[in-house]
Amino acid sequence: MENSILFISKGAQDSSTRYRALQYFPYFLAAGWQPTHVTISGGIIPVFKALNAARKADIVVLLRKSFPYALLWILRKLSKKLIFDFDDAIFCNSDGSYSKTRMHRFKATIANCDYIFAGNDYLASEARKLNPAVAVIPTSVDTQKYDLSRKGKSDSLVLVWIGSSSTRKYLEEIIPFLESAALSVPNLQLNVIADFELASNYLKIKNIAWSEQSEATELCTADVGIAPMPENNWTKGKCALKVLQYMASGLPVISSKSGVNAYVLEDGVSGYLISENSQWAQRITEMTKDRTTLEQMGKCGRKRAQSEFAIEVVFQKMLTIITDNKAKRYPEL
């Protein structure tokens, strides 16, 4: 099949798969490409299916996942052109500590791919130590699906956090500070859009089950998006997805001053950056005093999301690299 591109991932519901592959499929089709996706988890049968699909495709994109030596060797031999796309610091443990196994697989994958798509500058700098063919492809959002007309209006302040069990600990760390803010902010509410539920005796929490169909609508009914995150080698690899979703929703954002969050969010323009957890209550309290400023920050954030991180903007960068980089190399493992 001419101009065929195959994405291989660990699962269709993984956020990397949805945001760095599947959402681009209509754009690939419009540009004359035939995109397909296969998973390589769940036993030997998915592996064989993925290898067979790789043999037929013009370009194979490995999403985030690194592989054992033998499987990587086969993929390299079968693929006409092999690209590695990653948006996490997969070379270390999730607490930021060093992992010999992960680093070994990461190095082998990077060194034996024709091109690397890195989600941010930090990831790109790690990849360039092993392969010069690296481009920063930020995570993008479909800004058109965030319906700002549904935005709720009330006298209370509704915070929102969107995430999953893997990042639950970051939210739980600041709950005491949000509870402190609730003492001075009447009717303060936290909406948690996730695959788990939280409870508090001092802060009103509304738990909302995450779904791909409703996440945009739920975000647009809040007033302020929050993004707590510590600074370590793992979080440096994060690509600010939740901050981008808040901005696309026209929400001002309060975020920890860490990782790419500190680049995407303009302090004092589209929200506030927090250096210490004790600042959460202070910033939340300040935000209740001036709704006009909140709205202006939300507009600034959405404007930047549209100009730099909208799906159509990022796709064009990706497509240019895919179509213009004609050179193929077949390195030996």
Image (cartoon, rainbow, N blue to C red):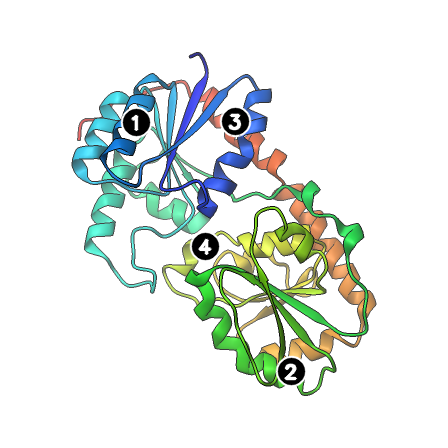
Distance from disc 1 to disc 4, alpha carbons, whole Å, reads 30 Å
Residue drawn at 59 percent across, 57 percent down: 243
The label number, if any, that marks residue 238 in the structure image:
4
Kind of residue sitting beneath label 3? Leu
Instruction: Please name which of the two marks, 3 or 1, marks the residue nearer to the observer.
Output: 1
Left or right of 290? Residue 178 is left
**Label 3: how many Cα within 10 Å (few below 14, some 14–19, many 20+):** some
Q: Position of residue 186 (x, y in %)?
A: 74, 82
Identify the mark nearer the N-term, 3 or 1: 1
Question: Residue 32 sits in which quadrant?
Answer: top right
Distance from disc 4 to disc 2, alpha carbons, whole Å, reads 27 Å
Q: From this viewpoint, is residue 242 visible?
A: yes
Residue drawn at 76 percent across, 51 percent down: 148
Tally the marks.
4
The label number, if any, that marks residue 49 in the structure image:
1
Identify the mark nearer the N-term, 4 or 3: 4
Left or right of 276? Residue 285 is right
Residue drawn at 29 percent across, 56 percent down: 92
Residue drawn at 51 percent across, 19 percent down: 33
Q: Nearer the viewer, residue 19 or 229?
A: 19
Q: Nearer the viewer, residue 130 or 2?
A: 2
Residue placed under numbered mark 3 in the picture:
319
User: Is residue 64 placed above or below 193 in the rendered structure?
Assistant: above
Kind of residue sitting beneath label 1? Lys
The label number, if any, that marks residue 262 in the structure image:
none
User: Is residue 307 placed above or below 185 in the rendered structure?
Assistant: above
Residue placed under numbered mark 2 in the picture:
181
Distance from disc 3 to disc 1, alpha carbons, whole Å, reads 26 Å
